[in-house]
Amino acid sequence: MLRVLRSLSLAALLAVMSLVACPPVNAVTPVPRSSVETVGQAPHSPATAPFAAESCSTASPEQKVRPAQWAPTKNPQTSVVSTLMRSDCAVIPAGFTKEQADRAETMEAALLARAKGPQAQPQEASLAAADCQVYWPAPYEVCGAIRDKYNALGGPNSFLLFPTSNELTNPDGHGKRSVFQNGPIYWSAERGAHPVVNHFFAAWQRNGWEAGSLGYPTSDEIVNPDNVGRRQHFQGGTIYWRLNEAYYVTGAIRDKWATSGAEGGWLGYPISDETKLPDGQGRMNRFEHGVVYWSPGTGAYAVTGAVLDQWSRAGFEVSSYGYPTADPVTHPGGVQEQQFQRDRIYSSGLTIPVASGVALSLGVPSAGDLRPEAVAEGVVLNGPGFQARFQRVADDGSFEASLVRLDAGAPTSLDLLFGAPAGYSLRATPQRVELVDSAGAVVAGVGLPMGFDASGASVPVQTSFEGNRLRVQLGNSTAYPIEFPMIAAKGDALEEWWSLGAEQRLTCHDEPYDCARVRNARGPAYNLSKEAFPEATETDDNRIDAARHCIWNGLMTEGANQGFAQRMARAHELDGRKNPDWTPNAQLMDVYNNKTGVQVGLRNEGSPENITSTCIRYAQEARIVPEPDTIDLTNPDGIDLIALRHP
């Protein structure tokens, strides 16, 4: 070590001593993204004290200087001189060779001589607007306004790091650019010089760089008010970045978005660039929580939530509804209304959630105004001679949708619109309309309606389904009101509990009066049985299941009669055989508990509260019988319940 130190000049010796005294750091310390200048900040110089090099012929790689900050070369060599080059004494930053570093040093010398002669300081090589500067070890010239912007950002000490090109002329013949390790700086006479990097550069490139609709940058990156996202302005629009995605908005769509609060408003950040629509006229942008559509004849309007799901399923702007012509309006009860070129869409405000951010929704299209009204557990849309009622019937999200003819002036048909996000499909079966996921599983559905008049008589109803529209042809009667109810529920509950299968529909058709009176008995049975056993994570073949069947049959017996309850329960079990999870033991359990429910209903006529409390008490004391065929299944007294397991 002593032999090495003696062989070095005093300057080199000091450099090596400083290396020993201080832990080595990277040759270049990039400025973090958070330190990117925002509009209005003052520039700062990229240079520390100039780097001086003397003979380093015997310096090992470990002894070479690793400066913490980049600095220009002091007294750069005009030609390559072995052992006297900066590259002989200092570590060359990654990405450059010794040959490039030595060429860069001679270029620095040439610029110094051209600027003020040999007595000029390194920083003085770039004082004039037309001058250029070289940043060792990069053998490239950065010139004029681009150089000034680069220096203002910190030069090689900034997030851009070192240049990788000379100044280039853009294809338009007017603008300029220089490329750096982490992105370019672009310049135009109208808007000056600005860096465009990372996701901003990718979004700009995707849209044609300066020759595209965005044109040249007009600002550096700007931190948004949420201190999370960023934005950068261009001649033709603004690119917004958040969570490693960047998209641009512009024109009337940007103006409409701004009125909603921009990225801090209810639409959130853009998640697409502005897109040209198939008609060649309209434009749209997608945002985190909706879309904004624009056309020359309608202007720009946002569409969001369930109305967006229903409108999109219908075909967006090429559907029978056309473009939106007004902002969405939210009414009491959560009803959302929006006017389109042809017809309005009223969303009910009730949905069946099936996954995170995914729900089945129902809406009513109308050529005229409907009057939304909030009611217990739901809403009513009042129209001329009719109502569309949507009311929650169970804690699992299930709700009843009922179309009601109030008088002879009511329309003879009404439509329901189904909405769901992309990735799900809708299909109609003889019993219901189903929402199906990509794996083919039924995740939600709506049973097809039946009709009952005020006297309890059955009223004919016909349905047809196309696209996402269920058209209901409403039969008539002289006994108003005439109701056409249907249940919307999740897939598992729809299949196992709510669905009116073929056998149950036949029972209702034969006994419409009783069916109409007790059609909502399932809701209390479902809710109260779950509330009684909060520790249970499943609802089948256990004490919850036992309580549910008991309450349902008890309420049907009390609300209609014993015979109807027995026939509906029998039909329910027959329909249940179509369920892939059906087992003989589960059916034997249900039959036993149905009998108890009927007996409880008979003993507590006129007191639904006693029916539910008795059934819950029986369920809490239910016998666990994994093999029901080992006990007396006649259940003549109806004073207990059984379960296959618990919880």
Image (cartoon, grey):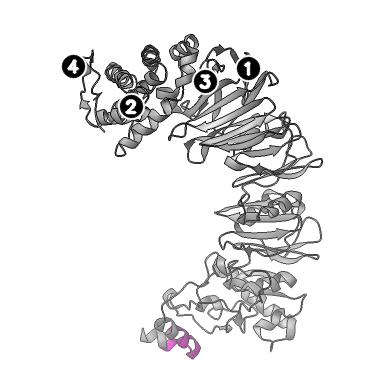
Q: Are marks 1 and 2 in contact (CB under 8 Å)?
A: no
- Viewer-nearest of discs 4 and 2: 2
Q: Residue 215: give x, y in percent of width and height.
A: 76, 55
Q: CA distance from mark 4 to mark 2?
A: 25 Å
**Kind of residue sitting beneath label 3:** Arg
Q: Which mark is residue 57?
A: none
594 relative to 524 in the view: left or right: left
Q: Earlier in the sequence, mark 1 or mark 3?
A: 3
Amino acid found under the numbered disc labelled 4: Ile
What separation in Å lies between label 4 and label 3 (alpha carbons)? 38 Å
Between the residue at mark 1 and the residue at mark 2, the CA separation in whole angstroms equals 36 Å
Q: Is most of the magenta stretch helix, strand or loop?
A: helix
Q: Which residue is mark 4?
A: 631
The residue identified by callout 1 is 474
**Residue extent of the magenta highlight:** 6-16
Q: Nearer the N terminus, badge 4 or badge 2?
A: 2
Q: Please, is residue 348 above or below residue 159 in the view? A: above
Which quarter shows the C terminus?
top left
Callout 2, which amino acid? Ile
Q: Earlier in the sequence, mark 4 or mark 1?
A: 1
Quickly name the residue at label 2.
611
Q: CA distance from mark 1 to mark 3?
A: 17 Å
Secondary structure under the numbered disc 4 in the rendered image:
loop
Q: Secondary structure at mark 3?
A: strand
Residue at label 3? 432
Residue 423 sits in quarter:
top right
Residue at the top extreme of this rendering: 510
Q: Position of residue 457 (x, y in %)?
A: 54, 12
Between label 4 and label 1, give the one nearer the viewer: 1
Query: Which of these two is toward me, 270 or 646?
Result: 646
* Number of residues whose C-alpha sits closer than 10 Å to that of mark 1, classed few (under 14), some (14–19) or many (20 or more): many
Q: Neighbour class for label 4 at 10 Å: few (<14), some, many (≥20)?
A: few
